[in-house]
Image (tube, rainbow, N blue to C red):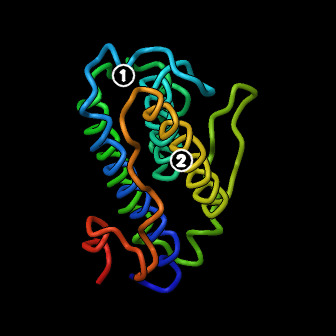
């Protein structure tokens, strides 16, 4: 891990670990409970986690200059928690790979984001920071929705510190 990529790579790895940890609890739910009404910005755990996945796809596509833009939001959302968890893991891996190759030059490059009002150029570093914040924000809502579904939500902040690092996070560190 190079010095420039390190904080972004660690955030991407933390994101992948937090999602895998969360989905470990979510995949215990059947489809009806997964889709049942819950408090939060989105009406269910399914809608919240699909939102995270789609927005991750949108921004990773922009970072990779894939050209899909807002068409990403036209796809069908997985209704099965296991299927959605696999889709999330795939985009998490793409993000971690992207972050592993960052350089100072790449961080200051711009990428086009396809907005309703038209294309907007954003720097790579700003896109990454926004994406990480977005993931944390909505995973917190999913955490509450999982508790509302009667499942004890997992601890998601035990990644970085040696003091309280979750055993499942240890493989992410040399």
Q: Nearer the viewer, residue 157 or 130?
A: 157
Q: Is residue 158 above or below residue 84?
A: below
Q: Is residue 40 left or right of residue 119?
A: left
| Quadrant where the image shows the C terminus | bottom left
Q: Is residue 69 above or below residue 90?
A: above
Q: Position of residue 87 (x, y in %)?
A: 30, 37
Q: Residue at x 52, y 21 (%)?
A: 38
Q: Is residue 6 above or below residue 11?
A: below
Left or right, 84 with reference to 118? left
- Local packing at callout 2 (Cα closer than 10 Å; few below 14, some 14-19, many 20+) is some
Label 1 neighbour load within 10 Å: few <14, some 14-19, many 20+: many
Above or below, comparing residue 113 to residue 107 in the picture: above
Foreground residue, 84 or 160? 160
68 vs 57, nearest the viewer: 57
Tag on residue 146?
none
At horizontal 26% and vertical 34% (from top left) the residue drawn is: 27
Residue 57 % position (x, y): 45, 39
Mark whose residue sits in front, 1 or 2: 1
Element assignment for label 1 = helix
> Can you tell which quarter of the image residue 17 is in?
bottom left
Q: Which residue is mark 2?
A: 135
Q: Residue at x 68, y 32 (%)?
A: 115
Q: How many marks?
A: 2
Question: What kind of element bears circle 2?
Answer: helix
Q: Quadrant of residue 33?
A: top left
Name the residue carrying label 1: 34
Mark 1 or 2, nearer chain start: 1
């Amino acid at each position: 891990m190079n010095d420039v990529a390190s904080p972004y790579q660690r955030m991407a790895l933390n994101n992948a670990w937090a999602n895998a940890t969360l989905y470990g609890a979510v995949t215990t739910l059947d489809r009806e409970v997964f889709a049942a009404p819950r408090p939060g910005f989105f009406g269910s755990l399914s809608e919240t986690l699909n939102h995270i996945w789609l927005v991750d796809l949108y921004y990773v596509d922009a970072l990779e200059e894939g050209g899909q833009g807002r068409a990403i939001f036209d796809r069908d959302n997985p209704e099965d928690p296991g299927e959605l968890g696999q889709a999330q893991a795939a985009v998490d891996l793409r993000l971690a790979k992207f972050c592993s190759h960052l350089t100072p030059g790449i961080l200051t490059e711009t990428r086009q984001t396809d907005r309703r009002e038209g294309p907007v150029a954003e720097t790579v570093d700003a896109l990454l920071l926004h994406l990480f914040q977005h993931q944390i924000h909505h995973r917190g809502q999913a955490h509450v929705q999982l508790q509302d579904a009667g499942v004890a939500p997992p601890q998601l902040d035990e990644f970085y510190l040696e003091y309280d690092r979750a055993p499942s996070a240890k493989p992410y560190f040399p």
